[in-house]
Amino acid sequence: MSPVHPLDEAATAQAVIDGNGTLIHWSEGARRLLGYSPEEVEGRPAADLLAPGSTGPLPEPGDDRRYGVLALRHHDGRVLPVWLLAHRLERGGGWLVLTPLEGQEPRTLEDPLVRAVLAQAPCAIAVYDERLRLYGLNDAMCEVVGLPEDRIRGLRVSEIGSRRAGEQLEREMAEVLASGRPRAVATYARADGEDRPQHWLARIAPLTDTHGRVIGVSVAAHDFTEQYQARERLQLVNEASMRIGTTLDVTRTAQELADVCVPALADFVSVDLLDPPENGGEYDVEPPAAPVTLRRAAHRSVNEGSPEAVLEPGDADVYPVSSPQADSLIAGRPLVAPNTSGTLEEWLSSDGPRGRHVREHGVHATMSVPVRARGRTLGVVVLSRFRRRDPFTADDVLLAEEVTARAAVCIDNARRFSRERQTALALQRSLLPQSLPRTAALEMASRYLPAARAGVGGDWFDVIPLSGMRVAMVVGDVIGNGIQASATMGRLRTAVRTLADIDLAPDELLTHLDDLVVRLSAEAGAEETTGEVGATCVYAVYDPVSRRCTLASAGHPPPLVLPPDGPPRQIDVPPGPALGLGGLPFESVELELPEGTVLALYTDGLLESRDRDVDAGLRLFCRALEESSRHLEGAAHAILRALLPAGGAPDDVALLLARTQGLAASDVATWDIPADPALVAPIRKQVADQLEIWGLTVATFTAELVVSELVTNAIRYGEPPIRLRLIHDAETLICEVSDSSHTAPHLRRAKTFDEGGRGLLLVAQLTQRWGSRHTPEGKTIWAELSLLGEE
């Protein structure tokens, strides 16, 4: 098979001769130039084609390259002058390239083109003729090309160096040759194919004869490798500032540092960090002492899968004094060492797996840079080269220091954020209910999820048992995040429990809570803390006896309700202002909930998403609740799975699900009491009979005493109508006495010789707890007796 020359056969006349000067290949371009077919010339001596009297520069055995003007005999008998360029082949023959001169006389060393080559110039210059073949070059250009002039004269740019870069430069030269206007082109050349490429600015200018005709082009090459590398370093620093620290995650930030450095600075980069102090404090100001234990945070290689890594992220290792990691940390500055250095060889020989990896991959240079921020050492970055043959330079060290310093601040910020997040999360979880109370009124399930990436917020929920078997439910969201928000959440949750304990109506409770938030905000301003205190909240009270629920909202998303025989819907609760605005009223709404109704209270983090609007989230919420409402724990899990992304919630989420339960009419007994003290004894008898029906005769004595005292006080100090109600479940017996007076009773300690004042003290001693609550009609005094342990 004939060899293939880089030039296009259809455009160039080519021939191949063997070591004896016999033509063994004749191209289509040669046939068109001289008119001979391959069958006519192949196998004949090449000298047979010479015109009579011509002794042109045909290649001789041993010649590497010959060139010059040759007179050949055309098939039709005429003489054709051509430019001959001959290359020697490895098999001892030669490759001939023939270019017609089209009537032009060959130039001599005296013509202007040649003199331009020989002119003294401070930069590398080459001259190309009108066919874009090298005609001459000065010594400076020979040094740039790395080849002597006699080996490359007559070649095109694409035949000398990089073909791709040469073809680009040829196109630019052709434009200059055609237009006669100079231009500048940035290009590069790689010496020996190993080191960094040399970057050049080629200035191409037309060359003209005395008549102004363009007869060639000159190429002046200016080395701007240092300027280019400086621009690359600046670009890498700028890239590092944009790519490193996109999140407040230590591992992710370390990985971003490794990604930026490969392959721009090294072929393999590892980031190893010191474990944080156990007590959660700061790292030591002084560098650690060797041997030092480091944990791999991230690594990156130019090879897929990081085969050079001995450790995986999360693994820890102990580094002795002879290791680059420990040496750099102890010295507190970057260290560069070739793998032939004594201390490095000693460490690699003692560490079998790491030494094998270094030898297998040909790692020849290592640079270790401490990761330091705010005067403290956090870890070390190790950069290694095995694919790039050039060593680390002083500029590389400065660049690695700059990039690592920027990353160190981001890593320290992420570490501080993680520590604060863990503290806030621990505080948040300690302030939230550890378990939900068991009540006869509600079956409940709850979930709390902190934000996946942002700081821990102030979302909370609570379930508060009230008097008369009623249960209060609250879900709220404090504005802001972090420890401050968690602390504010704890104060608000405590305030809600305190206000609920005095049985305030939902709208009244939110009014008092709003006053508290206003005061907290004023205190925050006085302490010169950033931001104001604010929150949203929804508060609901469910009564299992009447099966009615009263709700009020302070700027919070309305709850969902799922009736036992209908689709889920949002409750139309008057929105009310957010807590902290002050001076604006709150309104409550009351609705009847059949037994088995599911209430869903939540914070806005459950519905908010970048990928969908709130209405779409609400539809998903309703569908998940309806499809899985049979078991509330499963429903809570299904709701979170349907609404939250796989990576976690973008904001804090609090969810509280409650299924209503009603008390049977047989578990409640009610009597209207005449305002006559003489009728207290018959009332005690009726209570005893009712307790016997319920099978609670053991509690009869205590219940009679409590009822007697409460009814007597209502008759003596209250206003009719007076009503007595007994409520019981498996654990509690509740006695309630209501009247139309709004005067609340007060517990006081009677003196030794006082004849009265011991009634409520007696009630407090005999019952589990007691209290009073105001109603639209007056007040109710209640007392709870525990039935646990009674026989």
Image (cartoon, helix red, strand yellow):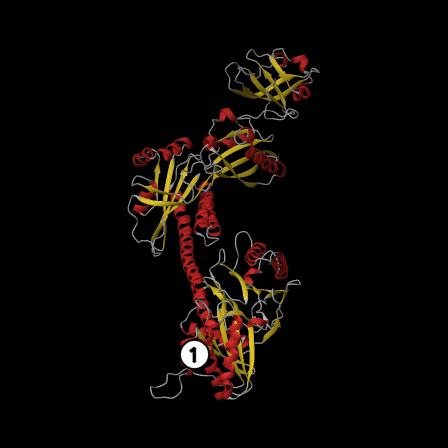
Q: Residue 520 in the image: state x and y as whole percent.
A: 44, 73
Q: Could you say which is closer to the camera, residue 282 or residue 158?
A: 282
Q: Residue 737 in the image: state x and y as whole percent.
A: 51, 80
Secondary structure found at label 1: helix
Rendered-image quadrant of the N terminus = top right
Rendered-image quadrant of the C terminus = bottom left
Q: Image height check: is 512 above or below 190?
A: below
* Quadrant of the image occupied by residue 178: top right
Q: Residue 267 in the image: state x and y as whole percent.
A: 44, 38
Q: Could you say which is closer to the camera, residue 328 or residue 668?
A: 668
- On screen, residue 210 versus residue 421, left or right, reads right
- Dot 1 surroundings within 10 Å: few (below 14), some, or many (20 or more)? many
* Quadrant of the image occupied by residue 667: bottom right
The amino acid type of the residue labelled 1 equals Val
Q: Could you say which is closer to the camera, residue 519 or residue 385?
A: 519
Q: Is residue 671 visible?
A: yes
Q: Image height check: is 212 above or below 39?
A: below
Residue lying at the far right of the rendered structure: 76
Q: Is residue 207 visible?
A: no
- On screen, residue 25 versus residue 751, left or right, reads right
Which residue in the protein does label 1 denote? 763
